[in-house]
Amino acid sequence: VFDNRTIADVVAEFNRYNTRKLIVADRKAAQTRIAGTFRADNIEAFANTAHRVLGLKVEKRGADIAIAN
C-alpha cells in the first residue's frame, strides 16, 4: 500500500521482492507521486498503472521494465 509516494520509492520496494526489476529511467519519472495498493509480486500491474494513470512510458528491457517520463 502506497500513499503519495514517489515512483522511485515504490520501485525500490518492488525491487526488494522480485528478481525481475523495475528501472526508473529519468529524474522526472522518479519524482512522480502515486498512491495505490499493488501486489508485491506483480510488477507488470504496477507498470501498467503507471502508464495508464500517470502517462509514464513503460518499456521492456530484457527481463526488466523501465519507467520514464
Image: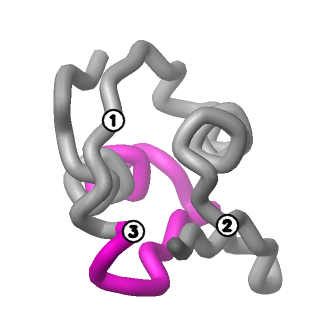
Identify residue for label 2: 57
- On the rendered structure, is 8 left or right of 57? left
| Magenta residues (range) | 12-29
Q: Nearer the viewer, residue 30 or 61?
A: 30
First in residue order: circle 3 vs circle 1:
3
Identify residue for label 3: 29
In the rendered view, would you say 42 is above or below 13? above
- On the rendered structure, is 11 left or right of 51? left
First in residue order: circle 1 vs circle 2:
1
Give the image location of residue 59, x and y in percent.
Answer: 76, 73
- How far, Cα to Cα, is label 1 from label 2? 15 Å
Q: Residues within 10 Å of mark 2 (few under 14, many from 20)?
A: some
Q: Amino acid at mark 2?
A: Lys
Residue visible at 53% across and 44% down in the picture = 54
In the rendered view, would you say 19 is above or below 68? above
Residue visible at 26% across and 24% down in the picture = 2
Q: Amino acid at mark 3?
A: Ala
First in residue order: circle 2 vs circle 3:
3
- How far, Cα to Cα, is label 2 from label 3? 9 Å
Identify residue for label 1: 34
- CB under 8 Å between discs 3 and 1: no
Give the image location of residue 25, x and y in percent.
Answer: 48, 84
Name the residue at the front extreme.
55
Give the image location of residue 21, x and y in percent.
Answer: 55, 66
Q: Amino acid at mark 1?
A: Ile
- How far, Cα to Cα, is label 3 from label 1? 11 Å
Q: Residues within 10 Å of mark 3 (few under 14, many from 20)?
A: many
Q: Point out the image quarter for the N terminus.
A: top left
- Which structural element holds mark 2? strand
- Which structural element holds mark 3? helix
- CB under 8 Å between discs 1 and 2: no
Number of numbered callouts drawn? 3
